[in-house]
Image (tube, rainbow, N blue to C red):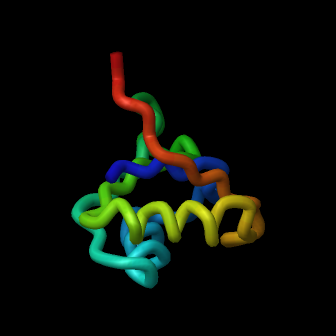
């Protein structure tokens, strides 16, 4: 299951996101979205988790939680059209 994580602090790195979500279950991949021109974080990421049940628990527990001074936004990622 793919998860969208928004409102990330711009200093957060992929390893931080992976570590945060591994508390809920196995993480397949983390993709922190970077600005093309500056190479800096755009403040959101996509995480693929092995198990939908673990992913839903992570969304439920982390959505709105404070992380590095910002309230996280988590939801199931919508597929691209």
Residue 62 in picture, x, y percent from top left: 63, 68
Given residues 80 and 45, the one toward you in this image is 80
- Residue shown at 65% from the left, 52% from the top: 73
Residue 48 placement: quadrant: bottom left
- Residue shown at 48% from the left, 62% from the top: 56
Residue 36 placement: quadrant: top left
Q: Is residue 48 left or right of residue 74?
A: left
Residue 51 in picture, x, y percent from top left: 29, 66
Residue 3 in picture, x, y percent from top left: 44, 51
- Residue shown at 43% from the left, 29% from the top: 37
Vertical position of residue 38 compared to residue 64: above or below: above
Vertical position of residue 28 compared to residue 24: above or below: above
Q: Is residue 6 left or right of residue 25?
A: right
Residue 79 placement: quadrant: top left
Count numbered badges in the picture: 0
Given residues 58 and 44, the one toward you in this image is 58
Q: Quadrant of the C terminus?
A: top left
- Residue shown at 72% from the left, 68% from the top: 65
Which residue of the protein is positioned furthest toward the front in this rendering? Answer: 53
Q: Is residue 49 left or right of residue 66?
A: left
Given residues 14 and 5, the one toward you in this image is 5
Which residue of the protein is positioned furthest toward the top in this rendering? Answer: 81
Residue 70 in picture, x, y percent from top left: 75, 62
Vertical position of residue 32 compared to residue 66: above or below: above
């Amino acid at each position: 299951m793919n998860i969208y994580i928004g409102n990330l602090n711009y200093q957060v790195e992929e390893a931080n996101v992976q570590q945060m979500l591994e508390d809920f279950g196995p993480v397949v991949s983390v993709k922190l979205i970077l600005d093309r021109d500056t190479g800096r974080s755009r403040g959101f990421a996509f995480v693929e988790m092995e198990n939908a049940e673990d992913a839903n628990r992570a969304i439920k527990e982390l959505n709105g939680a404070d992380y590095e001074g910002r309230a996280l936004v988590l939801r199931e990622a919508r597929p691209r059209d």
